[in-house]
Amino acid sequence: MERAEVLKRVIGILTEAQEIRKAVEDEGEGDEAFDAASEIEPRVVTQMLNEMLPHISVPADAAPQEVAHLLAAALGPALYTMVSGFTLAFTSLAVAHDEGRTDVSSAEVLQSLALQVEAGRFDEGA
């Protein structure tokens, strides 16, 4: 998955998790709503991992060191890109918060970030 696609997927996951939590909270109150949202969010994370992590084929006769090398080579770049995406999203939300921005919601911050990604602002080397 290309870097821009990963960034957009991370933003989508954060937006979806926020919408799920909001819908659950609107239906219930207090701890019950938090518990219900906590049960839904792992499904969202599992879906993201299934979409974003590469499929890895390991020969049946592979030595443990070869398996470790295959896993590191396949997962390293994907995990780095995912963490970079979450860091970018977190930083964007934190900056808006720290600046005291009450004129934009977190959903609007994420939408703006998605538009910047789409425009190529965060392409490698840019």
Image: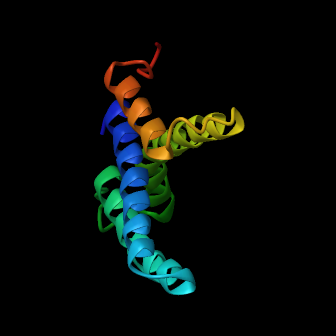
Q: In this view, does 31 lie above or below 126?
A: below
Q: Is residue 120 left or right of residue 25?
A: left
Q: Is residue 112 above or below residue 87?
A: above
Q: Residue at x 34, y 50 (%)?
A: 52
Q: Residue at x 30, y 39 (%)?
A: 1
Most extreme residue toward the bottom is 32
Q: Which of 79 and 33 is in front in this view?
A: 33
Q: Which residue is drawn at 36% across and 53% down?
A: 53
Q: Position of residue 124 (x, y in %)?
A: 44, 20
Question: Which quadrant would residue 61 be assigned to in this image?
Answer: bottom left
Q: Position of residue 125 (x, y in %)?
A: 47, 14
Residue 123 seen by the camera: yes
Q: In this view, does 86 lie to the left or right of 2?
A: right
Q: Which residue is drawn at 46% across and 13% down?
A: 126
Q: In this view, does 40 lie above or below 123?
A: below
Way the structure is coloured: rainbow
Q: Where is residue 108 in the image (x, y as percent from the top left)?
A: 43, 38
Q: Is residue 86 left or right of residue 6?
A: right
Q: Position of residue 105 (x, y in %)?
A: 49, 43
Most extreme residue toward the front is 103
Residue 42 seen by the camera: no
